[in-house]
Amino acid sequence: MTEITPEIVAEHGLTPQEYDKVLEILGRQPNLVELGIFSVMWSEHCSYKSSKRWLKTLPTEGPQVIQGPGENAGVVDLGDGLAAVFKIESHNHPSFIEPYQGAATGVGGILRDVFTMGARPVMNLNALRFGAPDHPKTRHLVSGVVAGIGGYGNCVGVPTVAGEVNFHPAYNGNILVNAMTVGLAPADRIFYAKAVGAGNPVVYVGSKTGRDGIHGATMASAEFGADSEEKRPTVQVGDPFTEKLLIEACLELMATDAIVGIQDMGAAGLTSSSFEMASKGGMGVELDLDLVPLREAGMTPYEIMLSESQERMLMVLKPGREDEARAIFEKWDLDFAVIGQLTESGRMVLRWHGETVAELPIDPLAQAAPEYDRPWDEPEPAVELDERALPAEGDPLGALERLLVSPDLASRRWIWEQYDHLVGGDTVERPGGDAGVVRVAEGPKGIAATVDCTPRYCLADPRSGGAQAVAEAWRNLNAVGALPLAITNNLNFGNPEKPKIMGQIVGCVQGMGEAAAALGTPVVSGNVSLYNETDGQAILPTPVVGGVGLVPDVALVTGIGFPGDGLEIVVIGATQGHLGRSIYLREILGREEGAAPPLDLAAERRHGDFVRGLIHGGKIAACHDVSDGGLLVALAEMALAGNRGCSLAVPAGESALAGWLFGEDQARYIVVAEAALPILEAAEMAGVPAQAVGATGGSELQLEGYGHTSLARLRSLHEGWLPGLMGGDLVGAAE
Amino acid sequence: MKSAVVVFPGTNRERDMVRALERASGRHPALVFHKDTEIPPVDLIVLPGGFAHGDYLRAGAMAARSPVMREVIARAEAGVPVLGVCNGFQVLTETGLLPGALLRNAHLRFVCRTVTLRVENPQTLFTGRFAAGETFDTPVAHMDGNYFIDDEGHRRLADNGQIAFRYVAGGAPGEANPNGALDDIAGVFNESKTVLGLMPHPEDATDPLHGGTDGRKLFDGIVEALA
């Protein structure tokens, strides 16, 4: 038997104090299999040990919530007996090491989290962060990640309908790949991971177990160094074809009542799935590892337990239902094996070749999982930008053109055309708008979903930035006419052992909680990805929010494109001209400074409710939220989407032109209607600021007093940047 | 019109196709599984889109050899109309029911977007509702849609009216030809025009929510011809 040395303990990512706890629980030295199990169960990735203390502060309840955090995914009520099941999850570390497989298996993993609960996946989204466009690795990473997401989602037949992408040098050494899935289930037939009933069979289904991905969870819980490339063997390999069969087989079995509990084998594979199921039910479990379907001979118990081979599920069935279940999985050509049973012992016992190779108490291991209240620094207050000292903007249309070819605002068409966003025939809002929308259950209802985060705000002010991510998701859902229901979050940060980073985590979670409470969108699921650092350089704080809303009637959904000529354009919400941390400040003036735009959650709610009311009343013909780049960029996006120009008058008294056109004040939307007056009157009644700013029509974007520019020119700039970058046009990329 | 839709492991657009057929014919198509060896008596057999057998080995290669395909081939040879869309088109070329092959897209990327098609031969049971040269919009969504055939085969296709649709410039952004297909070919018939394969997805252009209903003409035409 391998001697457990301090080096082996350290290699397993356990601190000496954590190892002492292991010794205390077992009352003896663990063997290597047991140490491996402790290692993954207590990894940051599986235990949330640095973030749990703060995650507990988030609002998680509401009348619409059927299941909050703690299960495979969150569940919210859609009415009519339907429920939306959704979650977002990161695959950051693997995607940097091996972008195609890393991103593909990220999609596969989040799909399993959703169909495990009995839901058919109906939409995928993703939130991506890459390094500087001209960094030598960026094109390779973008190309691999996008192909991987497409390769998996396209094959399983789930439309990828929305997403967001940022480029920033802070992600040069740690890209972010966050994937979200939304599924649809009957509200009264949700499946949980809880395993009960001594003697009930524990069943393994799906792909065979191989040696891939061993210790992936541990890898994802440490910083990268110069050797990160050598970690390639810890990345799993995806097989979307098998996943598609697994979805069909699981949903077919779920239509019967044979399943007691079900859990996908994700991070830490068989270990965490069996452990969590038994732990939730207060049961013990006995597994015979000789019965686990293996891809190759000679695998050790250590490898079998820690493998992260994809497309596998663990189920507990009612006794006597094995044959019925087996027939379904065999029909779909999938492995099916009874590998053990539940016991009353409260212990996990693993047998292999006739011997007991591990025996661990389940509850103490789960209960004693480390939880840290890590020291954190209060973030320093950002210094307000002195906007009066900025140079006057003499060429606003020139600035617009430069913004539309900037990395964070250029068209993402090159990316989303690689995703099948139409399969299923229910896609109502395609990528490129504010939120993706799919029709459900033959209509008229639909689900809207979006992913949002503005890391530059989070860096300036974590609390305000965390709240802004929730508010922007709220806005994007309202803008298509959806009633926001709940959110899922993906907290991407650097090393939590550094008080400065921990301060970012604390601030962002606090802000997120405040906004979620104020806007009535509780957090029902989520994922944490820490240690996104390379050689001590951390990413920007990136707490991504995935929002889900209910569309009562998909026929009422508004897109962002101008739908006709001669329509009047109204800005909802007050324009103060806040330029601190704006894209304009960064791209045009080369400065990343100032405070994040102030957020007024009460106004946010009022404006959102007002806009949604306009859409449901059929009062407006198009809607777009105002976010990155400000008002003029939002108008240009609406013009390009509708292939129709507009003319815009800067209201009298707007002395700070740049702030009015490019400021990133929050709680704003642009709406378009036959006539502005009724909208302005309704807004006044509702106590919502509103301003008529122009009208649609023509093939140019006109700014009274400052000239005009053609849509054709704007389009070629906006659409050209990303294909230029990916086609090797680094001159274009450097612009 | 009675129809059957074949489902291979990895097929993923069968629901889209079923709805389009229901909309046009008012009848629910029979779903036939790849392991089935019999197909009920129907007027039309449809091979829908997806990734049959994961597109492993080569798109359509394994599906073309599955048990159900022996019956599909026999029916097609007996004159029963067969429609293959996207992956279904790939399967039909792999069985030899249609000439040519579908190669990887020239730009080596998956492509999902709207394209414009021109009807090259309206005098078939599939295209009767269209006028010669009429154009219509449908989405494409594929990795391997780059149609190829040798010179002699190409000449035969052209001479015999077997080119069903070509990609042409339209309203949607991007190149007219989304995949590098030879001679902009988007769909072809067999010699007797009873088998049609095309890469685009007319079934995903049959509902106003799809952003257009141009695809209905194809399905309505088929129903009219076969009812």
Image: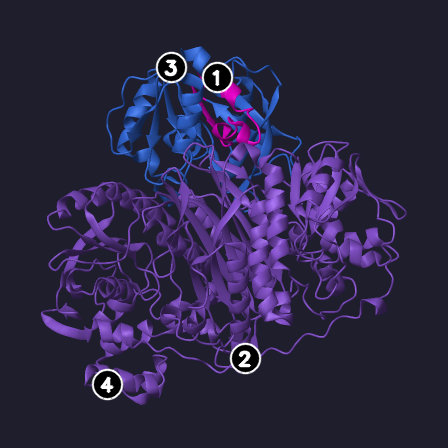
Tell me the element at label 4: helix
Say if mark 4 contacts mark 1, CB within 8 Å.
no
Query: Do marks 3 and 1 both belong to one polypeptide chain?
Result: yes
> A121 or B91, which is in the foreground?
A121
Please state if A241 lies on the left or on the right of A641 as rendered: left
Please tell me whether residue A95 belongs to the stretch shown in magenta. Answer: no
Q: Can residue A322 be seen in this view?
A: yes
Disc 2/disc 1 C-alpha distance (Å): 63 Å
Q: Name the residue under label 3.
A: B1
Q: Give percent across and percent down for residue A476.
A: 59, 49
| Residue A99 x, y percent position in the rendering | 49, 61
Please tell me which residue is depicted at 33% across the width and 63% down the height of the picture: A308
Q: Nearer the viewer, mark 2 or mark 4?
A: 4
Q: What residue type is labelled 2?
A: Asp
| Residue B213 counted in the magenta span | yes
Chain A representation colour: purple
Residue located at (40% from left, 65% from top): A235
Residue drawn at x 73%, y 66% as measured from the top left? A580
The magenta-colored residue range is: B190-218
Q: Name the residue under label 1.
A: B220
| Residue A462 x, y percent position in the rendering | 59, 70
Q: Is residue A559 left or right of residue A716?
A: left
Q: Name the residue under label 4.
A: A24
- The quadrant the C terminus of chain A occupies is bottom right
For the residues labelled 2 and 3, the Cα–Cα distance comes to 67 Å
Give the mark, 3 or 1, whose residue is nearer the N terminus.
3
Mark 2: secondary structure: loop
Residue A551: x and y, percent? 51, 40
- Outermost residue to the front: A685
Q: How far apart are marks 2 and 4 (CA)?
A: 35 Å
